[in-house]
Image: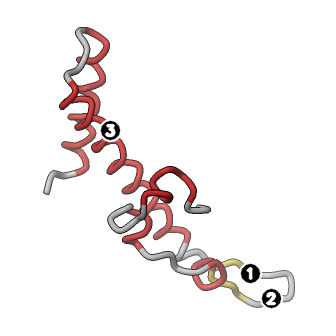
Amino acid sequence: MESMEKKIQRINALYHKSQKEGLTEEEKKEQARLRSEYVANIRASLRGQLNNIDIQEKDGSITNLGEKYGNRNDEQETGEKMGAGAKEGTDGG
């Protein structure tokens, strides 16, 4: 598996190539796949951070955001098992 840093470098290389000379259909598909993986990784990372935040309520009680709003499945966040509707942005999240 490629590291995220290498994926970002490839995304940037494809972007620069697209500006200079254009991309083949295969490169366009690769670019879309890499961008999707990047966004899924960022979302999963952010979700992990938010799940570890505790907030002190006005009454003094402590509420964990992950428990309050539900620890969403990492597979769902990375899109590995999403249905077609979810890929189109209709997953409600």
**What numbered label is drawn on residue 40?**
none
Mark 1 to mark 2 CA distance (whole Å): 6 Å
Residue of label 1:
56
Q: Name the mark nearer the viewer: 3 or 1.
A: 3
Three-letter code for the amino acid on which mark 2 is drawn: Gly
Three-letter code for the amino acid on which mark 1 is drawn: Gln
Residue 69 position (above or below residue 24): below
Please give the name of the residue rendered at 28% of the width and 29% of the height, measured from the top-left corner.
12
Three-letter code for the amino acid on which mark 3 is drawn: Ala
Residue 67 left/right relative to 15: right
Residue 12 position (above or below residue 75): above
Please give the name of the residue rendered at 85% of the width and 81% of the height, measured from the top-left corner.
58
Residue 72 left/right relative to 54: left
Estimate the x, y position of residue 4 in percent, counting from the top left.
25, 50
Q: Does dot 3 land on a helix, a strand or a loop?
A: helix
Please give the name of the residue rendered at 59% of the width and 74% of the height, measured from the top-left corner.
53
Q: How crowded is the residue under tag 2: few (<14 C-alpha within 10 Å), some, or many (20+)? A: few
**What numbered label is drawn on residue 60?**
2
